[in-house]
Image (cartoon, helix red, strand yellow):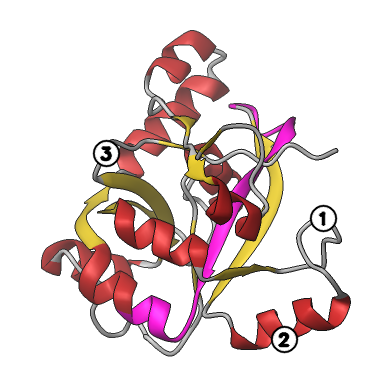
Amino acid sequence: MDINNIRAVFDEEHITVYQAYRPGIAVPAIKAQKFVPPFKLTRMTWIKPSLLWMMYRSGWGQKEGQEHILAIKIKREGWEWALANSCLSHFDSSVHESHEIWKNSVAESPVRIQWDPEKDIFINKLDYRSIQVGLSGISVEKYVNEWIVSIEDISENCRDIYQLVQEKKIEEAKALLPQEKIHPLPCDIAKICGASEIHIS
């Protein structure tokens, strides 16, 4: 059985998610403290609460178009709204009663959930999965206009961590990582998004 854990930096009111963008989108967003054009509300946007999975996806901020790593603090009520209104990106018989019900959910849901193997500091696969949340339609509008509390450019910190890994200074590199912990969810929301392990009733 796959272990699907949400590991994140969070408190009672907020959770931090990560995105990577080219300068043309990232710099105006940092200045405005919200996403502004050329960011498009009409496109699906993926948010990730695991920094190391973001490092895997962006190549430590070295992939073209993903040079700026943004740490985005959002309201937990918005995050949980997204999960409660989500649908898994693939059919899972433990979550969905039928393939037809899943297909209908995919068509109707404004939020897509994907679980992928979490990464360690060497970007190797770990034995549990990390969540990626795809926002579209009304959920993107809520994300941009209601949920975002702050946007911080952490690109330099990420490059520093990567450099330490390259120099085999692993403990120093780990000391710069955010202290992510398992994020508990109400049982009904955990069921919808396919999360496992720790839930709150």
Q: Position of residue 119 (x, y in %)?
A: 65, 35
Q: Where are the magenta residues, as a range?
A: 121-141
Give the residue type at disc 3. Answer: Glu
Disc 1 to disc 3, how far (Cα)?
Answer: 30 Å
Q: Which of 89/51 is in front? A: 89
Quadrant for the N terminus in the image: top right
Q: Is residue 137 magenta?
A: yes
Give the residue type at disc 1. Answer: Ser
According to the image, label 1 marks what residue? 94
Q: Position of residue 180 (x, y in %)?
A: 44, 29
Position of 180 compared to 128: left or right? left
- Mark 1, Cα crowd under 10 Å, few <14 / some 14-19 / many 20+, is few
Taking the image as drawn, is residue 24 in sight?
A: no
According to the image, label 3 marks what residue? 12
- In the displayed structure, 14 sits above or below 112; it is above
Q: Position of residue 109 (x, y in %)?
A: 57, 80
Residue drawn at x 82%, y 69% is: 97
Residue drawn at x 67%, y 80% is: 105
Which secondary structure lies at badge 3? Answer: loop
